[in-house]
Amino acid sequence: MDQTQEFLRQLVEAHGAPGFESNVAAVMEQRLKGVGSFSRDRLGSFICEKKGTAASPRVMLAGHLDEVGFMVKSVTKEGFVKFLPLGGWWGHVVLAQRLVIKTRKGDVVGVVGSKPPHELRDEDRKKVLEIRDMYIDVGATSDFDVRKRLDIRPGDPIVPDSPFAVMANPNLLLAKAWDNRIGCALAAETLRALQGTKHPNTVYAVATVQEEVGLRGAQTSAFKLNPDVGIALDVGIAHDTPGAEGDEKLGGGPLVVIYDSSAIPNRKLIELVMDTARRLKIPLQYESVERGGTDAGRIHVNAEGVPCLSMGVPARYIHSHVSIIDRRDFDRTVKLLAAVVGSLDRKTVDRLT
Ligand SMILES: [Zn+2]
């Protein structure tokens, strides 16, 4: 496993439900030691500043640290844990899954209880169970056990339990939380790729908090940095599986978002990305998302407005315990981003607006 892949593994295996991202920020900090100077916004978004040959323009590359997770709501008398979603979940992918509850005393593994098919009535079989009707079984037999011995409390974060794996095709990587540790990794590796080059700007690798619950860290970190240009880095949805409608596929190259419900990207910035990709012979894919957005949704309305776009790599099965990306898409996106950032001098950025 090369160093980059090891970094990716550490990122996806770290636990970071929205509002509880510090373990993931620590992995970013480790990887970016010596590359730039670190700071945080007051919600916990991680920032690494790398100065080039000019103090401005200020370029913000932002991936989000958080992953979709849950939170402990209450404990039943019998010792089962009721929970709420943090981020968008579909009941189908939650039942019978392993989860980790993060308590003050440490991690507690549990499973979302499900009925065996023998006991399902015909009408139940057709329904998607709602999360409010589910519970986590931590192997306890009473609420005393859960409260006193395990110290599970309302408000404790919960994350999927799912290990990183390299698939039969070694380019394909299976893990939880590619949404959006891959965006964090893109920001970090782009900064590393710029080491030893003369980029005519100051660039920030930002790993934002609380994207999945409303793009909150993007708002606070953009306020802190006041960027002149912003690129949100996130997963797109691959449509290369049975029954999916669309052309985006794993291995097809970086994905540029042309529309989503949170932002209309800056057209000139997209053209700059297209021209750079053509020069580097990197294929691009385009995505439009009618429901959902990215951190660009907040960054582009910071202060007087910031030219922004959103791009990243395609992924299968996001917002579940397992998602798949293609390492080649990641590598090509880093190469493209480094070249784009390298071309963002004052004159070029002024021309975007
Ligand atoms: Zn997401």
Image (spheres, rainbow, N blue to C red):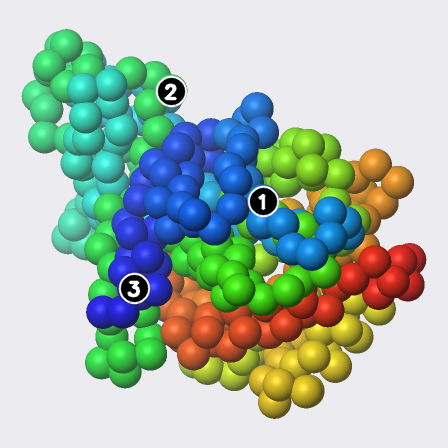
Label 3: how many Cα within 10 Å (few below 14, some 14–19, many 20+)? few
> Cβ(mark 3) to ligand 1 < 8 Å?
no
Q: Residue at x 29, y 64 (%)?
A: 3
Amino acid residing under circle 3: Gln
Q: Position of 81 compared to 233: left or right?
A: left
Task: State the quadrant of the C terminus.
Answer: bottom right
**Element on which disc 2 rests:** loop
> Hey, which quadrant is residue 16 in on the image?
top left
Which circle marks residue 286 in the picture? none
State the image coordinates of residue 313 (x, y, percent, origin top left).
Answer: 52, 69
Which circle marks residue 49 in the picture? 1
Q: Which residue is mark 3?
A: 3
Q: Nearer the viewer, residue 44 or 226?
A: 226
Q: Are marks 1 and 3 in contact (CB under 8 Å)?
A: no
Task: State the quadrant of the N terminus.
Answer: bottom left
Which callout, 2 or 1, points at the residue further toward the start of the chain? 1
Which callout, 3 or 2, points at the residue further toward the start of the chain? 3
Classify 67 as above or below 326: above
Amino acid residing under circle 1: Glu
- Asked whether the viewer can see residue 210, the reply is no
Disc 3 to disc 2, C-alpha distance: 36 Å
- Asked whether the viewer can see residue 53, the reply is yes
State the image coordinates of residue 305 (x, y, percent, origin top left).
Answer: 85, 45
